[in-house]
Structures are given as C-alpha cells and as structure tokens.
Amino acid sequence: MHADHTTRRGEVTIRDLSKSFALNGQPLPVLRNLQLKIASGESLAIVGPSGCGKTTLLRILAGLEQPDAGQVLIDCLPMRGMGAERAIIFQEPRLLPWLTVLGNVAFGLDVQGTPPAEAKARARHYIRLVGLADFETAFPRQLSGGMAQRVGIARALTVQPEILLLDEPLGALDAMTKLIMQEELSRIWREEQVTMVLVTHDLEEAIYLADRVLVLPKEKGAVARLIEVNLPRPRERSDNDFVAMRRRLMAEFGLSRPVMGSNVGL
Amino acid sequence: MTYQSFGPYTEARRLEPAPSAALLQRAATIGGTALSRYGVVLGFLILWQVSASLGWVNAAIFPALDTIVVALAKALASGQLVGDIAISLQRAGIAFGAAVIVGIPLGLFMGQIRAVERALDPILQLFRQTSALAIYPIFILFLGLGETSKVAVIFWATLFPLLLATIGGVKEVDSKLIEMARTFGASQTTVFARVVLPASVPAIFVGLRLSATTALLLLIAAEMIGANKGLGFQVMNAQYNFQIPLMFGAIFLLAALGLTANAALVALQHHLCRWSIVAR
Ligand SMILES: Nc1ncnc2c1ncn2[C@@H]1O[C@H](COP(=O)(O)OP(=O)(O)O)[C@@H](O)[C@H]1O
Ligand SMILES: [Mg+2]
C-alpha cells in the first residue's frame, strides 16, 4: 500500500471530481469537475461557505464517500476505499469512552494488527507530542474539549499517515485553545512531513497553516479558486503581509472592508 | 515551544485523589450519604419493631423483627429452608443463565441487522406485553407441572427484557464511532468487537438487572402456583399453617436474594464500565 519511501509520498491528484446528493428527489450538485494537485508534504486549506462541499470533498479523499465521476490518485495510483496512508480527523474527537487516552491513541494501530507493546510505545510518543503525557490513564469524560481533540489528533498521527485530512478540527474550541492548537498543528506538520488537507471556516487559520488555500464556491457555475500563501514560516498573525493576505482572502468572499476579526460567520 | 510554557492555557485538570488531611471530612460525608440513603429503611424497621413489641399492631400478624429472625434462624439451622433456597436458586439461576446465553448473542445479532430487527420487533413487543404468568398454563400443558415448566416460564419472562435492551444498545451505538474505526481499516468483525460490543455493555446491564428482577418475580409466582418446594412455596405454606414469623422470614430471604443479585450485577457493571458513571 505504501509507496516507496525514496519517492514522493502523499501526493494527491484530483481529476474531474463530481459529486451530487439527492435532495427531495432532485440532484443537488455539490462538487463540479474539481481539478487539483496536492504536492507531497504540502499544507492545503479548504475554505468556503457552509454547505459548499468541504466535508464532502474530505470524505471522498478519506474513502468514506464515493464520487459520481472523476478520480482521485494517491501517489499516482487510483485510490480505492480507505487506506492506511490516509488518516482523517473529524470535527468531533470521536473517542471511545471506554478506553483511556492511551487506549484511544493506540486504537488505530491495534485495529491494524500492530503488536500491543509496539502500539503502546508509539502511542506514548504521540501523546507526548500533543502534550498529554500526564493524562495517559484518563478516560475521555475526564478531558476538556481541547484535550479530547488533541487525543483524536494523536490517534491519527500514530498510524503515521502520509496524508492527514482534517475537517474543521478546531472549530469547536475556544479562541485561546484554538491558537495553541494551530501552533501545534503547524509544528506537527513540519515535524511529521505529512501532506495536510485542512478544512476550516477560519480564514486566519487557513493563512496561518496553509501553503495554498482552495476556495470552494457555493453558487452554481462558479469555479473553485486557489490562492498561494507566500509567507515565510513561522508566521506571525500581526505581520503586515499576513494582514494583507487575510484582506485578500476576505475579498474572495466579498468582505474586504478594513478587517477586524478573521472569523467570517459562514 | 513546549507545553509547559503555555502555562494557564493548558487546561490542566488534576487527577490525584484528595489529600489525606481531608480523610475525616470524607468519612463524615460517607456517613451522611449512608444516612440519607438508608435512613428511611432504618426508620421503617425501627417503627416495625417498636409497634409490634409495644402492641400497636397485632403481633400475631405483624410479629416483631426479633421473632422473625429467631424463626428464620431456627428454620435454617434445622435445614428446613436450605433445600428450598437451593431449589429456588436453581430454578431462577438456570432460567436466567439460559436467558443470558440466548438473549445477549441474539440481541447483538438482531441489533446489527436492520431488516431482521424490523421484521421481528412487532412479535417481540407482542410477546413482551403478554404477561408470562398468563401463559404459564400453556407451559404446564406442554411441559407438565415439574421443573421444566417452571424454568421455562421464568426463562420466557426473563428473555425479553434482556433481548430488547441488548437490541436497543446495539442500535444506539454512535455511528460516528463506527465510521472512525472503519477509517483505520477495521473489518466488520473488528468494528463489532472493538466498538459495538463495548458500547452496548451499559444497555446490556440495564437488561440484565431488569431480567434478574423479573426472574425472581416469576420464580415466586410459579412456586406459589404449583410447587411443593422453594421459597415461594414456603411463603404460601407458612401462611396456610399460620407460621407467620416463618412466612416473613421467607419473604425477607426473597428480598435479600433480589438485593444480592442486583448488588452483584452493579458490582460487575462497575468493574466492566469504569469509564461510565453507573446509576444504581
Ligand atoms: N449524505 C448526504 N446526503 C444528502 N446530502 C448531503 C449529504 N452530505 C452532504 N450533503 C449536502 O451536500 C452539501 C455539502 O455538504 P458538506 O460537504 O457537508 O458542506 P460543508 O462541509 O462545506 O459545510 C450540503 O448541502 C449538504 O446538505
Ligand atoms: Mg463541513
């Protein structure tokens, strides 16, 4: 399943992807002829108004949803269903309440048949990485929302995917925890060298984390746009270039007044 | 940047137990909890004892507690009740065990397959709503008045709460958790073993406790209707022979049996479900 490690890993090619759902017997087109190439190790953010198909696209990439037409290639091979080279982090942590933090983080490896001792050791590594070393034996009900989401992130990282798919993973967190987690995600992405596809409705988060931002439109006929974020890392939210970038992105949504907040209510 | 440096923002929650200085306060709290929990029972027993020994009630019908305890101890010491306890435990135990062996696997299976569950739900509801006692005569007709019909009727009544609770538990399992497991490549069997089964355990325990109560109820009824041995029979028999203290003694034994069964199930549930908060 894994491509040769000396070649590029975690490259995603999306070709002519279309998907519609049935709504009251009528087809509801969600994605229309989407073309996109995500480079190995790239960080791509997907933004767009609610209902524009961000989650649908991510679920197709995860293999949880079938496209009506088009193709997804992973490392130049057609993607078939779910695969160990991809891991998805949902908007909710989706922890198993009967397992401890350690058990939850090791869950992916357990399911994949990794020997328990090795699974535990690797899980511990990623628990430390997300800063929860003191909470290994805690149960999910003993965790705050931010901690639970970190457990979910650690669980996805533990299976060492080449492609990390994130669906508004920080959407439910308070502002301060969110900033910390964005920093963490940025660090993890650098250290793990994964391809990251991050769905978010937070434009500042997109600029902070992404190499490129895909703006999905909601209206019929409109096309998706790609915006390069050419800012040096680590990024600083108050830098002039950062603010200018944010203004430009807001213009995409017809919201380009002098900018105060970044979180457009979509 | 390390996590420690985030200081006040790393929502740290302490998990250590309370310091030992608070031990006395904890003991007092436990005492208070026990009093608020069992105070009324204690008051009831005291009222019983006092009103019987002071003659407020007819002691021939409501013997004092000490009289009952003495009668019970005598009956147990002479071996009179021991055989009855054994046969009652055997009847309820076999029926309950069979209900567990049949009900839980069947419920786990039915809960997972929507079509099977939908097709069988109406008949299950019908069976459940039909009092097992009402159909006891049918069991007697087919199986005679012996052990088999008694065990069968208890089994019948015990099966449905457990079966329905298990089916309900499986159906309630969060599909998002199942989807999460599948994204890690979990097979059907793995999803069942690692997600569906553990998630259903609390609901199964609700069914188990309901079934245990039902088993005792049906046990007593069946023994009162057609038996010459067993605790239910002894309650009736003692009443016929006007051995009222012994009758109350047998009733107390039955109550103790029910409480013990429930306590055992709660303890097991606590052991298996440390992760959830168990309601008593
Ligand atoms: N399983 C489904 N069945 C029917 N319609 C769906 C389903 N999933 C999503 N949709 C519809 O597709 C559209 C896009 O949904 P989604 O991808 O969740 O949007 P986003 O994540 O961008 O908010 C919405 O209009 C939604 O109602
Ligand atoms: Mg969404």
Image (cartoon, coloured by chain):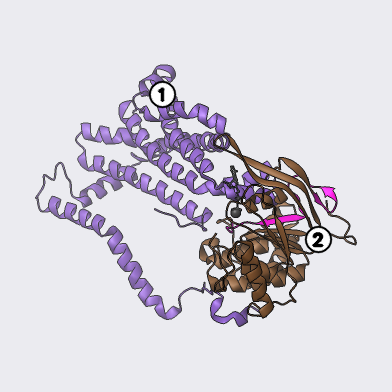
Chain colours: A brown, B purple
Q: Which segment did they paint magenta?
A: A73-94
Whether residue A76 is situated above or below residue A27 in the rendered picture: below
Residue tagged 2: A39
Is residue A185 something one can see in this rendering? Answer: no
Q: Which corner quadrant holds the N terminus of chain B?
A: bottom right
* Residue B270 is one of the magenta-drawn residues: no
Q: Nearer the viewer, residue A191 or B215?
A: A191
Q: Quadrant of residue A20?
A: top right
Pointer 2 residue Cβ closer than 8 Å to ligand 1: no
In space, the residues marked 1 and 2 are separated at their CA atoms by 77 Å
Q: Chain of mark 1?
A: B
* Rendering coords of residue A81 (x, y %): 74, 45
Residue A238, numbered circle: none
Residue B146, numbered circle: 1
* Rendering coords of residue A79 (x, y %): 79, 47
Q: Nearer the viewer, residue A12 or A216?
A: A216
As helix, strand or loop, the secondary structure at mark 1 comes to loop
